[in-house]
Amino acid sequence: VQLLQSGGGLAQPGGSLTLSCEASGFAFENYPMTWVRQAPGQGLEWVSTISGSGSNVFYADSVKGRFVVSRDNSQNTLFLQMNSLETEDTATYYCAKIETTILTPFHFWGQGTLTTVAS
Amino acid sequence: SYVLTQPPSVSVAPGETARITCGGDEIGDHHVHWYLQKPGQAPVLVISYDNDRPSGIPERISGSTSGNTAILTIRGAEAENEADYYCQVFKSSFEVVFGGGTKLTVL
């Protein structure tokens, strides 16, 4: 299993950024995926989860209405489109493969990508 | 919203047993999962469903639940066990809750 993350970087408050997570080593379309973030020096915070088909999506209240999770199963890639960014969104964002179904643990994590929101 | 409470830090002497607690209201009604995270690295699942060990996790690491507290136990602590440890549960209507994390120091 490999999860290769890209995207991230510096964005201005109110701006947008898209993160990507390219998966390999497993049948991507069969597994739900999730995003978890970690602000500098802080703990883990769940952000969003998407089912294997992409038909079911879930968001933390802190990002609902601003972030959009999606996936392209033909390209084995997970996305997180982040809009209306706030300074509080500054964090390392991790994608993770979920064990089997939606309410099962986060089995394998990507390496993380840092997003900084600042003017 | 649901809260999981962990001690910010736990210290243990090499070779001794470390216990990291995770408190939550009626936590026994939920499966608890544990992750470790070393500095600069991604989290790793070490205990799932309260006390199952994923492949590659040594038997020295175990989980249990007592009352309103889940416990991660590390027997024979070694320097390599130094990390931040997080507990996690799923709540109904899809809420994912992490504990605040516990920094384990082996000294």
Image (cartoon, coloured by chain):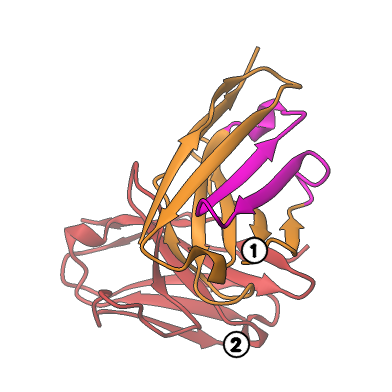
Q: Residues within 10 Å of mark 1 (few under 14, many from 20)?
A: some
Residue B101 in picture, x, y percent from top left: 49, 56
Q: Nearer the viewer, mark 2 or mark 1?
A: 1
On screen, residue B40 versus residue B15, left or right, reads: right
Where is B8 relative to B14, above or below? above
Q: Is residue A91 visible?
A: yes
Front residue of this view, candidates B1 and A90: A90
> Mark 1 belongs to which amino acid?
Val
Chain B: what color? red
Residue for badge 1: B97
**Residue lying at 67% horizontally and 86% vertically, measured from the top left:** B29
Q: Chain of mark 1?
A: B
Front residue of this view, candidates A116 and A71: A71
**Do marks 2 and 1 share a chain?**
yes
User: Which element carries disc 2, helix, strand or loop?
Assistant: loop
Q: Answer whether residue A69 is magenta in the image.
A: yes
**Residue lying at 35% horizontally and 81% vertically, measured from the top left:** B53
Residue B52 in picture, x, y percent from top left: 40, 85
| The residue stretch that appears in magenta | A61-90
User: Which element carries disc 1, helix, strand or loop?
Assistant: strand
Measured in 3D between alpha carbons, the distance from the residue under mark 2 to the one under mark 1, in whole angstroms, is 19 Å
Front residue of this view, candidates B85 and A36: A36
**Residue lying at 65% horizontally and 34% vertically, measured from the top left:** A89
Q: Residue furthest top?
A: A119
Please state, as top left, top right, bottom left or bottom right, where the N terminus of chain B lies in the image.
Answer: bottom right
> Mark 2 belongs to which amino acid?
Gly
State the orange chain.
Answer: A
Of callouts 2 and 1, which one flags the residue occurring earlier in the amino acid sequence? 2
